[in-house]
Image (cartoon, helix red, strand yellow):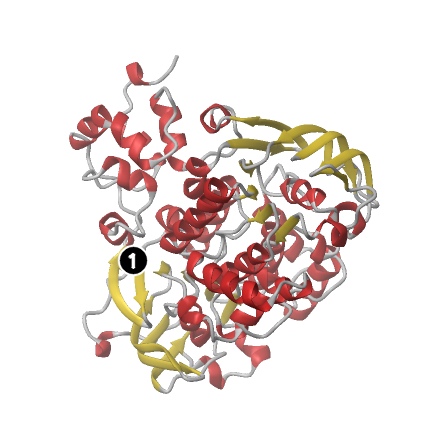
Amino acid sequence: MIRFDAVTITYADAPRPAVQDVDLAIEEGEFALVVGPTGSGKTTVLRAINGLVPHFSGGTLRGRVQVAGLDTRTHRPRDLAGVVGYVAQNPATSFVTDGVESEISYGMETCGLHPSAMRRRVEETLDLFGLTEIRDRGLTTLSGGQQQRVAIAAVFAAGPSILILDEPTSALDPVGAEDVLASVDRIVHDLGVTVVLAEHRLERVVHHADRVLIVDGGRVTGPAAPAQAMAYSPVVPPVVHLGRAAGWDPLPLSVRSARRQAGPLRAALALAPPPRPAPAPAPAPTSRSAMTDGTGAAVLRDVSVRRGSILALRRVDLHAPAGTITTVLGRNGSGKSTALATLAGLLEPVRGQVRVDGRNPSAVAPRQRVRHVGLVPQDAAALLYADSVAAECRGADEDFGVRAGTTADLLAGLLGPTESLDPARHPRDLSEGQRLALALAVILASAPPVLLLDEPTRGLDYAAKERLAAILRGLAAGGRSIVVATHDVEFAAECADRALVLAGGEVVADGPAARILTESPAFGPQVAKVVRPAPFLTVAQVLATGALAPQLVPR
């Protein structure tokens, strides 16, 4: 169905190929998962399947890519549209209409599908992807996760035999992600659709895959069986990391398989001391009147916010003192982004008070507001306007009056020692994770005492998330208040002091992150589910106990 023969792809002015000497075959009806570190070339592999590389991206393709017998060198993306459907990392870039139902219909209309068949397929697609309740909504009113589901549904409805998905669950809550992946699994097994999916959150998807491709440093290995691939993959989900450390064979790919092997580990952990708590944040106030508006704090007090006809927040209390990391969790559309936008002064509440660094942020001029609060939105590209990475960094240094090179140094710290960016690259040519790092560096250059991050781990592999968590912990230790809206429960387990859970715009849980994440079936990290009732959230916490005795670890 899909075949790469000695494929090497080099972008214009790039010092080395993005991918090199790739030979692979994906058969009809397979669910193939593409994994690898941030910036390793996964998106290049995906975009080569439908001809976006090189026809849209430019550069040079040596070798041959065949899709359903069609050579992508001679068939452009429009020629392959009836065979291959592609959903990019940022779904909003693919929308061509204003509403959910019209977007799903658009692809079928361009294919000339009969109206009666089109109507039936729209209904089936809405049901399959859980979109029936929002079918009449405008696309701009949807949360990022809802937009992702609409983008996938719109491409699927046009009837391609191959579906290419780039980070499809990055903006979805855990339950929503599982719903989408279950739908994808269904179209693979019931309809024989071939799916090629790249994803960083392997804990969500690896157990769904038939085979796994590993992309690392431009080299591609596989496809291989998931358990075999996870044995040597440079990026693995927490449950596989735990299985490697414990020497389990076969390696578990899901919480269920891990729990079946974790009996001795749970017994050992029952005798181990609980994990050392993070430096204790100030306790959540027991009443609204007890909340302080002090320097560096982020506070919502009895806040309600309306977005159009929707009451997006309902009497929400949030207290994030200086020196703490607070995560805001909740399903898509629960109000997380609205809470951050309100703290950033972008939305005015209809009720209640907002205080950030001792001020009402909406009453501060935008150029001064960034000195008190910085927001990195879901779409990091919204903060980037220059035509190169170097120009973006220089512009931030000049805008904030900091030493030349400050933003570039921050960017290097976020990327880590193994990854670097060509200063001449345009921000639009970066991966989602690289764009996030650049946008975060720009915001950090202004040194705001309150930092707001909306889904900051989109496009980041596990190592990059660990670096980000370490950076945030360092910033909090330096006195900043950090509020993170996220669906990434593994990231929350790594860095959060407190956790707030929203549902329907209301606070349904608020407390220490360890307690909230351990107790939650929906927002619990993998390790917590494997070792419960022991109160451990991460592999690092388990390793610190010494419960993985030498006889359990492979020599």
Q: Is residue 103 above or below residue 551?
A: below
Q: Is residue 521 above or below residue 506?
A: above
Question: Going 66% across and 68% down the picture, which residue do you hit?
Answer: 401
The x, y position of residue 293, in whole percent, is 34, 76
Quarter in which the C terminus is drawn: top left
The foreground one among 125 and 55 is 125
Question: Label 1: which residue?
Answer: 281
The foreground one among 12 and 354 is 12
Q: Amino acid at mark 1?
A: Pro
The x, y position of residue 156, in whole percent, is 56, 54
Secondary structure type for disc 1 = loop
Res 300 quadrant in image: bottom left
Q: How many residues crowd around disc 1 within 10 Å: few (fewer than 14), some, or many (20 or more)?
A: some
Q: Is residue 244 left or right of residue 46?
A: left
Residue 147 appears anywhere in the view: no
Q: Is residue 159 above or below residue 418?
A: below
The foreground one among 425 and 108 is 108
Res 62 quadrant in image: top right
